[in-house]
Amino acid sequence: MTTVSYAECPGRERLLRLVDPGTFHEWLPPAERLASPHLAQLGVPSSFDDGVAIGRATLAGRAVFVAAQEGGFMGGGVGEVHGAKLVGLFRRALRDRPDAVVLLAESGGVRLHEANAGLIAVSEVMRALLDVRAAGIPVIVLIGGANGCFGGMGIVARCADRVVMSDIGRLAMSGPEVIEASHGVDEFDARDRALVWRTTGGKHRWLIGDCDVLVEDDVAAFRAAAIDALDGASPVTLDGLEAEHALLAARLALLPDVSDADDAIALWSRLGVADAGRVVDLEVEAVRALRAA
Amino acid sequence: MEWSTLAASLFGDDHGITREGDFLQGTVTFDGQAITVIGTTNHAPIGVRLALAQARAVLDTVARHPGRPLLLLIDTQGQQLRRRDELLGINRAMAHLGMAIDHARRRGHRVLGLVYDQALSGGFITSGLIADACDALPEAEIRVMRIPAMARVTKLPEAMLEELSRSNPVFAPGVGNYVTMGGVRRLWQGDLRACLREALAEAPVEDRRAQQGAVRGGRRLAADVVQRVLDAA
């Protein structure tokens, strides 16, 4: 079977290839012409789905709700309509109880052209997502688009039950360009691709445990991982939050404030990854084997 | 307003809130009720360490003092823009803080945010914007980005954004814009103690910010779009 690159597919096509063939039923499709009025006001081209497709489908025969952000439109940025579509999807999931909600995330975060509305919208998405988790419905986030998953959507992703990434996916908060603009090229050289991937990329997120599954850049691999996560509901508990806190506090302690070695490689080594210096050259399968069980 | 001035006017000179670096923490008594106060000052950038400090205080309150209200005092320049924080998973630390606050709400703690100085982007999403309700002082500033920077990033003329910001609150910084969009419930005017009393008495449990934004005219689409998704065939 030929491999279809997840990164190279547009969001909508990715979604159609991910779910069972012919089962995607879209809500508020482009035919309804629900575009951002704010972009139009700025004279910026808009899109009839405001950069996100939402609806229901089946995945391995199970009922799921799905959303796919379109990185090719405004970098997947969350505006008022885009955010409200995601909130609506989660609220509907709370009402209709599908087996899972699958979010194909690709976003730079808040869309600056409608920044205030986007910021509030991201917080509404977070709350609606956590309502769904609290109801015992798993939320699965897939990250493998060329634009990565940044800003508010980087936070949203980490609110999910399960995060699946490819090695070329990126998950973080602020983009390297923003950090370089703020603190200079010595802080973060945004053109140093290897450094960018060591800091935000799928292999790094896998090795430190920020993603639950690391897959190849292949739609079929993402599909298999999503199917595997369908029964992975893990409602948030105080014990779970304490465990998370302990993990994050221990990780912080592993990396002293000032380090002259390569930070990422030092962190991997201290987490017990053997031959951490070789990680960048390894295939996905080899990297998968490096994380302690 | 200085945090200590605010604390003194709300809880008296003996308020019991202490500052450690940019982190504020304490237990205050208000109308005979204990309240956990957690906050930041000095326009703190929220990095992994500060996100965890806040989360720790939230989790301790949930574990040791079931039902005790939480007051979040907000003054932040946004997320820490450092490579090391990104490497350490700042987005995960911020999600953890947001989820801790959300969990407290679900277990019956009322959580109230108050922007007393400045609130920006990432630092705001996982504090005031995840609370039951978020209020602000009238002199507070809330924004994602200043207009000159927004003009650079979006490659749109600054004058055009300035002009539009007068008619459309989604573009421009300003606490008033966040009120009309439903992101901030109300501004505290006059007697601050009366404002806190009122705010604690009516902390909503449901997220009705999109509806408020529609009623107030600042966010006309969000509530309608959510409803259309619920109603779609």
Image (cartoon, coloured by chain):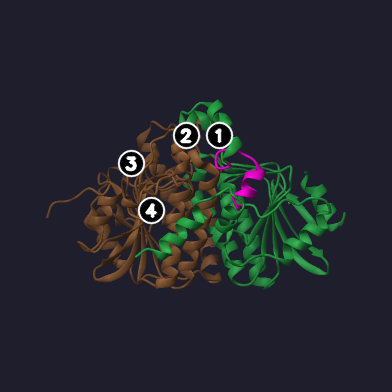
Can you give x and y, in whole percent of width and height, for residue B72 in the image? 68, 56
Labels 1 & 2 near each other (Cβ < 8 A): yes
Q: CA gap, disc 1 to disc 4?
A: 46 Å
Q: Is residue A46 left or right of residue B118?
A: left
Q: What amino acid type is highlighted by mark number 4?
A: Leu
The alpha-carbon separation of the residues under discs 1 and 3 comes to: 26 Å
Determine which residue is flagged by label 2.
A42
The numbered mark 3 sits on a residue in which chain? A
> Distance between the Cα atoms at labels 4 and 2?
43 Å
| Residue sticking out furthest to the right | B13
Q: Colour of chain B?
A: green
According to the image, label 4 marks what residue?
A207
Chain letter behind tag 2: A
First along the sequence among labels 4 and 2: 2
Magenta range: B169-183
Q: Which residue is mark 1?
A: B164
What is the x, y in percent for residue A267? Answer: 45, 48
Kind of residue at badge 1: Leu
Which residue is painted at 41% across and 49% down in the image?
A268
Q: Are the residues flagged by discs 4 and 2 in contact, CB closer than 8 Å?
A: no
Closer to viewer: mark 1 or mark 3:
1
Instruction: Quickly name the residue at label 3.
Output: A72
Q: Is residue B118 left or right of residue A284?
A: right
Q: Is residue A269 above or below residue A113?
A: below
